Image (tube, grey):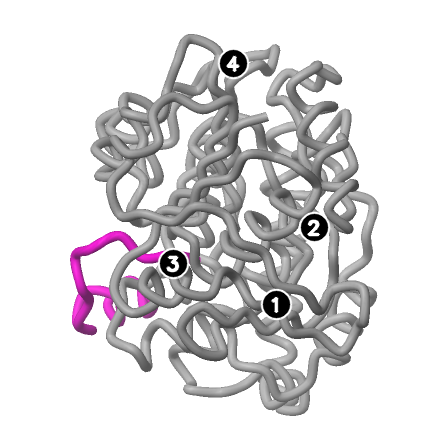
Amino acid sequence: MKVAVVGAGAIGAFVGAALHRAGAEVHLLARGPHLAALRAGGVIVRSDRPDLGFTAHPAATDDPADIGPVDYVFLGLKATSYAACGPLVHPLLHDRTAVIAAQNGIPWWYFHGLDGPLAGHRIESIDPGGAVSATLPRRRAIGCVVYVATEIEAPGVVRHLEGTRFSIGEPDGSVSRRCVEFSEAMSAGGLKCPVEHDLRKDIWIKLLGNISFNPISALARATMGQICRHSDTRALVEAMMRETLAVAAAVGCHPAISIERRLAGAERVGDHKTSTLQDLEKGKPLELDVLLAAVVELAGLTGTPVPTLRAVHALADLLAATSTGAGLPDAA
């Protein structure tokens, strides 16, 4: 198995290191001091779990032409970079190359492989003018929901914080050979990688937290714990989650989780800064289209009332428009 990790940041480098120690041929695409460190010392993974503290030495480069076509592209970029990532991805593709995008929120392929009135529908807010689909054809997509927290502790050094699960699945719900092979390689590397028949349920369950905590944390400059402990913002999160579940139901998905359970999980995380707040503090683009704008668009498409989501989206959209951000692709 030959795998290229495009955007070998905290998640990408962690996955690449695990696949490499499982015996896959892995190539990391990175840049700057992080790339230099990866070339010199490999990926150093540090964790409180003994089985996840290790060093791997996959190949690392900033030029996809050095790699050539691969079997799998693991996309570790922010979703804001997908439309422009063609020069990084296209040299890696052959006819059967699969693209596994480790993204939060609603993916560009969401209605691909579905039956019903919305079959094949393109969501404009996350695939404007079809730019993402043109760069990353939906037939290549394998969905991926990440239940892992990592961070770059230093160039070349990944700190594993919690979790080992990367749920994957085909848009059409089939259990394909390409999914099974990738799952087996991830498992051999020490990670959990179940192949789900209905990955969309996982997408909405994770989105319940991201759609509420991420924009509120950026607007209020608050941690998840602070948001939960403040009675009014807690009530705001609950309202956003209720509206999100209503939109999920309107497009035919019924995730089996309660708002109370989702809030309890967020409370256990404690005083953690969401990725959106971290991006805001670093002056990076805010990844809110796939988290919030897409759900508001789906609400309009299905006639679902979402007054709270619309209000928070208006504020978050203004914040994104007025905050500074770099234009280069950002690793997740």
- Which residue position holds label 4? 119
Q: What is the crowding at mark 3: few (fewer than 14 residues within 10 Å), some, or many (at least 20)?
A: some
Question: How far is mark 3 from mark 4, CA to CA?
Answer: 44 Å
- Residue plotted at (33% across, 60% down): 35
The spot of residue 101 in percent (x, y) is 49, 38
- Residue plotted at (80% across, 64% down): 51
What amino acid is at disc 2?
Ile
As drawn, the residue found furthest toward the front would be 40
Q: Which residues are magenta?
A: 314-332
Question: How far is mark 2 from mark 4, CA to CA?
Answer: 22 Å
Question: How far is mark 2 from mark 3, CA to CA?
Answer: 37 Å
- Which residue position holds label 1? 45
**Left or right of residue 110: residue 86:** left
Question: How far is mark 3 from mark 1, CA to CA?
Answer: 15 Å
Frontmost residue, 320 versus 238? 320
What amino acid is at disc 1?
Val
- Which residue position holds label 2? 205
- Residue plotted at (57% across, 14% down): 113
Q: Nearer the viewer, mark 1 or mark 4?
A: 1
Residue 320 on the magenta span? yes
The spot of residue 145 in percent (x, y) is 63, 45
What amino acid is at disc 3?
Arg
The spot of residue 114 in percent (x, y) is 59, 15
Quarter containing the N terminus: top right
Earlier sequence position, callout 3 versus callout 4? 3
Which quadrant of the structure image shows residue 301? Answer: top left
